């Protein structure tokens, strides 16, 4: 989840802490706004991680660009800093090889942008493409957004969100969404100032570990040609 992007200090915006959603990835919608659901879609058309161009933010020396293979180590470092901020440093098992393979394989399902200040990466956003059955359109789910605490106040968090909004609008996507920890009041204030609205009527559920394996095996007697088996083989 996003834990510390900075907002650049707009009115009513603390700008210091931004929180999105680690592993929450809701996609298709069963609510009237098309949001919610528990099916996440990776989307193969989100390949901006391969584009090289950056977006400069005025004369601040801040540039937002698609992540490149050389950014992987610092991104993993920032993920660990984010986990520490979110009081869960022991829950991160990500390493450089995993992130590099996820972002830069032949058919990536997850993408990333970084914010640079005077040539140094100070923040990042990791995202993937989801889908709403209510609108029949894709959207962007922001998995992580984080800016190094020592570099907040530059507007890097706001700039990263703005770039993802540009991607969404350019592609005809209908939304950009994320989750935020309930206690992260500075982030909540920042998001509300941007115009984002909480989806309070929804609760996220997650299957993981032994429970995920148990459910996966519940229908082992289903024919191998069944839809579920075919999907798992893809």
Image (cartoon, rainbow, N blue to C red):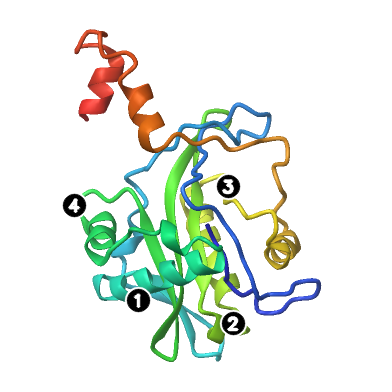
Q: Viewer-proximal residue, 79 or 42?
A: 79
**Where is mark 2, residue-wise?**
152
Q: Is residue 232 above or below residue 145?
A: above
- The answer for how far apart the CA atoms under marks 3 and 4 are is 26 Å
- The answer for how far apart the CA atoms under marks 1 and 2 are is 17 Å
Nearest to N terminus: mark 1 or mark 2? 1
- Count of all numbered marks drawn on residues in the image: 4
**Decide: marks 1, 3 in contact (CB < 8 A)?**
no
Residue plotted at (58% across, 38% down) = 204
- The answer for how far apart the CA atoms under marks 1 and 3 are is 28 Å
Helix, strand or loop at disc 4? loop
Residue plotted at (26% across, 14% down) = 220
Q: Position of residue 12 (x, y in %)?
A: 81, 71
Nearest to N terminus: mark 4 or mark 2? 4
**Residues packed near mark 4 inside 10 Å, few (<14), some (14 to 19) or many (20 plus):** few
Residue 175, numbered circle: 3
**Residues packed near mark 2 inside 10 Å, few (<14), some (14 to 19) or many (20 plus):** many
Residue 74, numbered circle: 1
- Locate residue 205 relative to residue 115 in the image: left or right: right
Nearest to N terminus: mark 3 or mark 2? 2
């Amino acid at each position: 989840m996003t834990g510390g992007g900075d907002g650049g200090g707009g009115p009513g915006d603390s700008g210091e802490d931004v929180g999105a959603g680690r592993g929450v990835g809701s996609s298709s919608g069963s609510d009237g706004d098309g949001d919610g659901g528990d099916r996440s879609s990776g989307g193969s058309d989100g390949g901006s991680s391969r584009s090289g161009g950056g977006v400069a933010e005025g004369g601040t020396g801040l540039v937002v660009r698609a992540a490149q293979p050389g950014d992987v180590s610092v991104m993993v470092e920032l993920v660990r800093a984010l986990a520490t901020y979110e009081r869960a440093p022991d829950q991160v098992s990500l390493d450089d090889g995993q992130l590099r393979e996820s972002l830069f394989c032949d058919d990536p399902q997850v993408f990333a942008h970084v914010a640079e200040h005077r040539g140094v990466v100070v923040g990042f956003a990791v995202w993937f493409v989801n889908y709403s059955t209510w609108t029949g359109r894709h959207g962007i789910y922001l998995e992580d957004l984080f800016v190094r605490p020592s570099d907040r106040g530059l507007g890097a968090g706001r700039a990263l969100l703005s770039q993802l909004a540009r991607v969404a609008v350019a592609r005809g996507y209908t939304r950009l969404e994320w989750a935020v920890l309930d206690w992260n009041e500075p982030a909540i204030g920042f998001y509300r100032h941007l115009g984002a609205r909480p989806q309070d009527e929804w609760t996220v559920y997650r299957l993981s570990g032994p429970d995920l394996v148990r459910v996966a095996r519940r229908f082992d007697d289903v024919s191998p040609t069944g839809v579920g088996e075919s999907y798992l083989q893809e």
